[in-house]
Image (cartoon, rainbow, N blue to C red):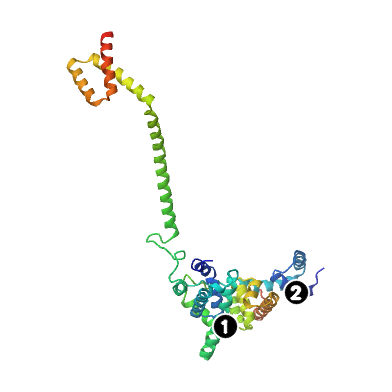
């Protein structure tokens, strides 16, 4: 596979997925942009070592690890401000108010805001799997490849995450009849 | 028959797309007939729909430009956005395309019959046709020479010497005396 000819196609195929995952993971647009750029520059640098049939898993794996690195670094440097930034209601909502543009779509329902907050309370791995499965439409097999775990672990973990989120919604809307999706 | 205490396991299987056809049929049947399980299933479905309905984020173009400048050097032609003044929307391109297509059709309809006409003209210049035309000219000129005045005849002879091909001139010269005498 010709590196220079194939690289832009690969970037086009995966850029939104990498950016979207990083954005929902970090709740910060600029950091998500940095992660996306970093992922594809690394892809270019390691092109010859990568199995071309597993590029999707590779880029998502790098994106996931870079997001964790970003979170740790941010936590270390700005311990206090991190608490504010990590609140999705403050950062994503802030984005939605200030940075509306052709590249951005922010039409969250009240329940979605509730779920975004609830996702923050999930264990790290559960949250990552939920983001990959629901926000980036990745199959369980691909998630298992990315996180290097058994597919059944992914299924069980995702369902545990669903259950937790259901409980959050039920506690807010006991009958769940008034839930607006 | 499915029991209500199995419903949680089956809902998990349903959401993970792990059900066999038989299990799905039994599950749907049970959901239809059991209001409690139906309500429970609807709650899960609401969570599922809410999670699946989050807006997808698009990577900004400036990130792409940075990626390309740090890797292949510049934005590749295949992904570079080419915009022309006046054609920044799809409608502009559609009209331009329609105009070009119309022009091509018009050109084709003009050229095609011309080609046919050229073909006919080529056929009319065949050797047989040329001989027939020459014969016609010979008889016509002979008739003219018979009826006109001597001075005019001289003028025509001179004109014939210059204008007509040698073969026709010879034919006229030979024919006129015969017609003169025979009339």
Task: Inspect this view and state whether residue A164 appears.
Answer: yes
Q: Which residue is rendered at x = 38% and y = 34% of the image?
A: B118
Looking at the image, is B154 positioned above or below residue B3? above
Work out how far the residue at label 2 is from the one at label 1, CA to CA, in angstroms. Answer: 33 Å
In this view, the mark in front (2 or 1): 1
Residue in the picture at 38% in, 28% down:
B124
Tell me which corner region of the image, top left, top right, bottom left or bottom right, holds residue A62: bottom right
Q: Position of residue A10 (x, y in %)?
A: 53, 68
Closer-to-camera residue (B90/B143): B143
Tag 2 secondary structure:
helix
Label placed on residue B9? 2
B133 or B161: nearer the viewer = B161
- Residue B77 location (% of width, % of height): 44, 64
Q: Residue B137 occupies which quadrant of the picture?
A: top left
Q: Are marks 2 and 1 in contact (CB under 8 Å)?
A: no
| Residue A68 disc label | 1
């Amino acid at each position: 596979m010709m590196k220079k000819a194939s690289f832009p196609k690969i970037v086009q195929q995966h850029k939104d997925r990498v950016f979207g995952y990083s954005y929902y993971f970090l709740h910060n647009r600029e950091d998500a942009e940095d992660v996306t750029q970093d992922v594809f520059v690394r892809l270019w640098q390691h092109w010859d070592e990568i199995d071309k049939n597993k590029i999707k898993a590779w880029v998502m794996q790098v994106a996931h690890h870079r997001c964790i690195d970003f979170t740790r670094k941010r936590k270390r440097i700005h311990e206090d401000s991190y608490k504010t930034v990590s609140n999705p209601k403050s950062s994503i909502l802030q984005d939605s108010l200030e940075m509306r543009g052709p590249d951005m779509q922010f039409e969250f329902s009240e329940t979605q805001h509730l779920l975004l907050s609830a996702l923050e309370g999930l264990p790290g791995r559960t949250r990552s799997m939920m983001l990959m499965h629901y926000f980036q439409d990745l199959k369980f097999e691909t998630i298992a490849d990315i996180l290097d775990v058994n597919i059944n672990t992914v299924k069980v973990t995702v369902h545990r995450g669903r259950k937790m989120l259901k409980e959050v919604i039920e506690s807010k809307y006991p009958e769940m009849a008034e839930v607006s999706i | 028959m499915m029991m209500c205490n199995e419903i949680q396991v089956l809902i998990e299987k349903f959401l993970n797309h792990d059900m066999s056809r038989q299990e799905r049929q039994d599950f749907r049947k049970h959901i239809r007939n059991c209001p409690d399980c139906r309500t429970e299933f609807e709650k899960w479905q609401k969570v599922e729909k809410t999670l699946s309905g989050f807006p997808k984020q698009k990577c900004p173009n400036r990130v792409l430009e940075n990626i390309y400048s740090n890797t292949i050097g510049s934005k590749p032609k295949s992904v570079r956005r080419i915009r022309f003044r006046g054609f920044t929307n799809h409608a502009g391109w559609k009209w331009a395309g329609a105009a070009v297509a119309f022009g091509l059709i018009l050109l084709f309809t003009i050229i095609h019959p011309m080609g046919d006409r050229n073909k006919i003209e080529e056929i009319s210049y065949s050797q047989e046709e040329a001989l027939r035309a020459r014969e016609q000219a010979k008889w016509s000129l002979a008739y003219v020479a018979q009826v006109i005045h001597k001075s005019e005849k001289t003028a025509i002879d001179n004109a014939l010497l210059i204008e007509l091909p040698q073969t026709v001139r010879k034919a006229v010269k030979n024919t006129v005396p015969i017609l003169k005498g025979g009339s």
